[in-house]
Structures are given as C-alpha cells and as structure tokens.
Amino acid sequence: MNDDAAPTPPILVVEHVTRSFGGVRAVNDCSLEVPQGGITGLIGPNGAGKTTLFNTITGFLKPDSGHIFFQGERIDGLPPHSVFHKGLVRTFQIPRELKSMTVLENLMLVPPGQLGEKLWGTWFTPWNVAKQEEVNLAKAVDVLKFVDLIHLRDEYAGNLSGGQKKLLELARTLMTSPKMLLLDEPAAGVNRTLMRRLADDIRRVREELGVTVLLIEHDMDLVTLLCDTLIVMSEGSKLAEGPPEVIKSDERVLEAYLGGQYTRA
C-alpha cells in the first residue's frame, strides 16, 4: 500500500490568460499556479503586467482569452463581488479607506449579508440585527487587536498614517474570513518600522489563520523575508519561478530588470 499523500492542488491556477488595451498586451498568454497555504511573491519590472493580472483574477477586468480557476472552480469573467464571496479578496496599491468613518466603523461595514441593511430586518427582527452586530463587533475588535490597531479604533480613518492605512486595509480583508489574499504592493509608502509590523501580520495571517497569500511587491528585502516562492513576470508573461535566493541570481531576471527593453530610451 502506498502511504504517500496525494499532493495538494494549487489554490489558484491561471491558464494562458491574455488581456490587451488597444494594441498593447498587458498580460500575454500568462500561465501560473499558486500553492495553497503559502506566501507567493509576484515580482517584475514596472509595466510587466502584474496589477493587470491581479485585476483580471479578481474580476475587475475580463480576460481576452484564457481561464482562471480558484479552488478548482472557474472564475474568469465573474464580477468582482462574486469573486469576493468565494473567498478571494484583494487590496489595492492606494488604500481605499472610508476617511470620514472611524477605524472600527470601516471594519463593521465589511461583512456581507448584514440584516440591518434591509428595512424588513430592522422592523421585524431587530433582535437578530442586534445579535449579528454584536458578533461583527467582536470580530472587528479581534481583528484590530491582530493588526495592532485597537488603540485607534475610534480614530477617523482619514487621520491615519500611510502605514496605518495599509494595516487597516489588511484588517478589512480579514473581516471577510478570506481563503486567499491578493496584496498589491502592501509596503509601498510604508516606513521601515511599520513595514516590519505589516510583514509580521502577513506571516501570521498565513500561519495562524491558514490564509494563502499572493503579493505584488517591489521591495526585495520584504519578498525575500516573507515569500516561499517568487514568480517573475516580464512583458505580460511568467519569466521565472523559484525560491527567492534562486530568483535573485537568475540571469533572465537580472536582464528583465536591468537590461533589454527596460533600459532602452
């Protein structure tokens, strides 16, 4: 009898995806897989197609061709809210906090299916509304403790620093109990102290909550520290894949970053 366990299938599969804008192919026949339960970095020069690929995976853009599978289910072409409800949640390069609401209120708005949003719920079943709000409040407090923002729960989100807003963005995603997080440049504009805090939180999201993470990041110190695997994109396609220490010395990667089209005037 063979005791070897079957390999865990990848949580996300991108197959031959292409997305063009006019005559420019931002994503060009791109194929990649993201293993379940890990932290994978998606890196590459500016203009390599990373954010366009994120937007296509999460339904903000429809692919011109190709297929995308999440947990074995095809999701290409689904609208963003449908992808979100499947547990595939993303952040953006620029945080989208609700500036005139408190940090806590920003989190309380996130959970889907809130009974208080429907008039009949507040009229006919106010006790259920109150019970659900109590549950959501407890979760929001736990999440704020997790990302070390609990001391700012009553602060207006618009008053937070850039790094704190990135932590708030992460906290908002955790209110959805995601299966996978797509983080778009989480360390951009963040000072080194808060970047270490953010890195610790991302690692804990994987280790303590079991959430798979795929992140776009230009800070090589951060991706080397955090990621199990790096996927390199260039000219809209996957160029290389491997552990950070291997990728950093790959001649094709060095050429993509430092030579070729990226150094021509």
Image: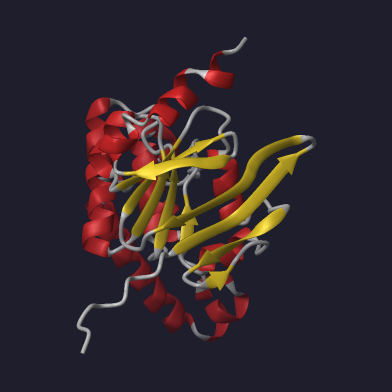
User: Residue 84: horizontal and vertical position, in percent?
Assistant: 53, 63
User: Residue 149: horizontal and vertical position, in percent?
Assistant: 27, 45
Q: Quadrant of residue 246?
A: top left
Q: Quadrant of residue 2?
A: bottom left
Placement of the C terminus among the 4 image quadrants: top right
Q: Which color scheme did the rendering employ for the protein?
A: secondary structure
Q: Residue furthest top?
A: 265
Q: Residue furthest right?
A: 22
Q: Residue furthest bottom?
A: 1
Relative vertical location of residue 6 with respect to residue 40 in this rendering, above or below: below
Near-viewer residue (248 or 192): 248
Q: Residue at x 41, y 60 (%)?
A: 180
Residue 98 horizontal side relative to residue 223, left or right? right
Placement of the N terminus among the 4 image quadrants: bottom left
Residue 264 horizontal side relative to residue 42, left or right? right
Q: Residue at x 63, y 52 (%)?
A: 17
Residue 114 horizontal side relative to residue 29, left or right? left
Q: Is residue 122 visible?
A: yes
Q: Residue at x 36, y 52 (%)?
A: 171
Q: Quadrant of residue 42?
A: top left
Question: Looking at the image, how many numbered discs can be counted on the residues?
Answer: 0
Q: Residue furthest front?
A: 1
User: Residue 251: horizontal and vertical position, in percent?
Assistant: 39, 27
Near-viewer residue (190 or 50): 50
Q: Is residue 161 visible?
A: no
Near-viewer residue (23 or 56): 23
Q: Residue at x 69, y 38 (%)?
A: 25
Relative vertical location of residue 123 with respect to residue 11 in this rendering, above or below: below
